Image (cartoon, rainbow, N blue to C red):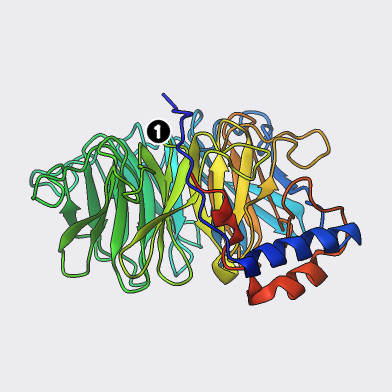
């Protein structure tokens, strides 16, 4: 169940920060702020036509080589590729269906990821396997239920991540492990139920991510923690259920991402918050249940990071996507109104950012996906009138140090 409880913790403000907030209010009187903009509909429940509809897309990924958006359809075991220009969808192609590679079936595609060579990877939640689809359309199963073949099976695979060297990492939700598949086909287990072997278990992992130097991070959904596995295979629990140790815990972690300076960002699905582990090892809460002060963060699932340190997180219960930028308060990047033209966003789940820095989001219960540029600046709700956000952002610049922390839990 999703917990709606949160403890309040407000940091004291310096006189300089108070002056800056006053400046924000004064500038708002002159209309120096930007209004939010709706995203563009990329694909709806019609999918690619009759018999090829889109149902319950749990994830979304950007393909920089093919210049495509990849969206799985869980219920009818399809994987779509959407090609677009300037927000206009040009084509919708089915990359894979339930027949999988023709020999091995695909059932319940959950996670998608794209490798450095443009190969698309998809995890079959019910078929207990992972497929690769090359840019040329060649399909192959790269791992099945047997997993390593020597004691670590792959059951209910969910999150996927691809390293720069082509290694594939998959979270076995029901097998409580993470497997590594090398380009040559060798399969290894890098973490399993015992976790770090020091009493910190890994239970029901949901998401996995790899950083630029090969460290792998995984969320333990039922063990309420996050592990790091370095390139030497050393396992370390880096966040546990105590969260930041200041009363802001981590419960049922889901999505995970790496920010611009190597920070680890994780969504607490039942703790209704977003935690960030800094480079120095400290953990801070960067968003709590209060959201932006107008819309709450409830049941966060997906996390993605973009240019300039921006962090996005989906609030699956309040049908919202929050945007966190350095030196700015939290804002809404997307709402349940979807594209503002009648195509609603219900149950936002998976997130990604494309090569232009545009946000991509999948609506699990609205059977669709959206993409586009979220607002570059959104004022504190109720303070500022619509206007030119760029001028305000320039004036504030480096003068505000993470104003969003004025509203942590």
Give the mark count.
Answer: 1
Label 1 crowd bin: few (<14), some (14–19), many (20+), radius 10 Å? many
Q: Position of residue 265 (x, y in %)?
A: 43, 56
Q: For the N terminus, give its image quadrant.
A: top left
Identify the residue at horizontal 76%, vertical 56% (top origin).
Answer: 87
**Quick one: which residue is furthest to the front in this view?**
15
130 or 223: nearer the viewer:
223
Residue carrying label 1: 107
182 or 20: nearer the viewer:
20
The image quarter containing residue 363 is top right
The image quarter containing residue 124 is top left
Left or right, 237 with reference to 302: left
Residue 41 vertical placement versus 3 (above, below): below
Q: Position of residue 371 (x, y in %)?
A: 68, 52
Residue 6 seen: yes
**Quick one: which residue is furthest to the right in this view?**
30
Residue 316 vertical placement versus 307 (above, below): above
349 or 12: nearer the viewer:
12
Left or right, 266 with reference to 192: right
Residue 20 vertical placement versus 347 (above, below): below
234 or 100: nearer the viewer:
234
Left or right, 149 with reference to 257: left
| SS at mark 1 in the image | loop
Q: Position of residue 235 (x, y in %)?
A: 17, 58
Residue 349 seen: no
Residue 142 vertical placement versus 305 (above, below): above
Left or right, 149 with reference to 25: left
Q: Position of residue 3 (x, y in %)?
A: 44, 28
């Amino acid at each position: 169940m999703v917990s709606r409880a949160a403890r309040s913790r407000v940091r004291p403000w310096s006189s300089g920060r108070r002056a800056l907030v006053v400046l924000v209010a004064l500038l708002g009187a002159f209309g120096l702020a930007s209004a939010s903009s709706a995203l563009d509909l990329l694909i709806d429940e019609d999918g690619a036509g009759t018999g090829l509809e889109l149902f319950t897309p749990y994830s979304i990924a950007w393909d920089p080589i093919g210049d495509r958006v990849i969206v799985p359809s869980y219920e009818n075991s399809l994987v779509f590729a959407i090609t677009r220009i300037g927000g206009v969808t040009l084509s919708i192609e089915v990359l894979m269906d339930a027949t999988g590679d023709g020999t091995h079936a695909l059932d319940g595609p959950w996670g998608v990821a794209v490798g450095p060579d443009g190969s698309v990877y998809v995890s079959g939640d019910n078929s207990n396997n992972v497929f690769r689809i090359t840019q040329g359309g060649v399909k192959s199963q790269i791992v099945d239920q047997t997993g390593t073949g020597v004691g670590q099976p792959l059951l209910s695979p969910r999150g996927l991540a691809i390293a720069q060297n082509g290694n594939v990492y998959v979270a076995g939700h029901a097998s409580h492990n993470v497997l590594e598949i090398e380009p040559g086909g060798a399969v290894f287990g890098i973490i399993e139920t015992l976790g770090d072997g020091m009493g910190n278990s890994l239970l029901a992992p949901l998401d996995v991510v790899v950083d630029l130097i090969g460290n792998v991070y995984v969320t333990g959904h039922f063990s309420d923690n996050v592990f790091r596995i370095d390139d030497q295979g050393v396992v370390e629990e880096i966040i546990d259920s105590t969260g930041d140790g200041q009363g802001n815990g981590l419960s049922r972690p889901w999505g995970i991402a790496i920010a611009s300076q190597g920070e680890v960002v994780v969504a607490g699905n039942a703790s209704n918050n977003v935690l960030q582990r800094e480079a120095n090892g400290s953990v801070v809460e960067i968003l709590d249940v209060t959201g932006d002060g107008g819309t709450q963060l409830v049941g966060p699932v997906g996390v993605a990071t973009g240019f300039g340190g921006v962090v996005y997180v989906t609030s699956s219960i309040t049908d919202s996507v929050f945007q966190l930028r350095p030196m700015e308060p939290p804002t809404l990047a997307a709402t349940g109104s979807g594209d503002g033209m009648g195509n609603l966003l219900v149950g936002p789940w998976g997130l990604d950012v494309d090569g232009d820095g545009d946000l991509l989001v999948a609506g699990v219960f609205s059977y669709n996906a959206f993409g586009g540029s979220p607002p570059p600046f959104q004022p504190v709700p109720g303070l500022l009138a619509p206007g030119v956000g760029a001028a305000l952002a320039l004036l504030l610049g480096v003068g505000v140090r993470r104003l969003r922390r004025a509203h942590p839990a």
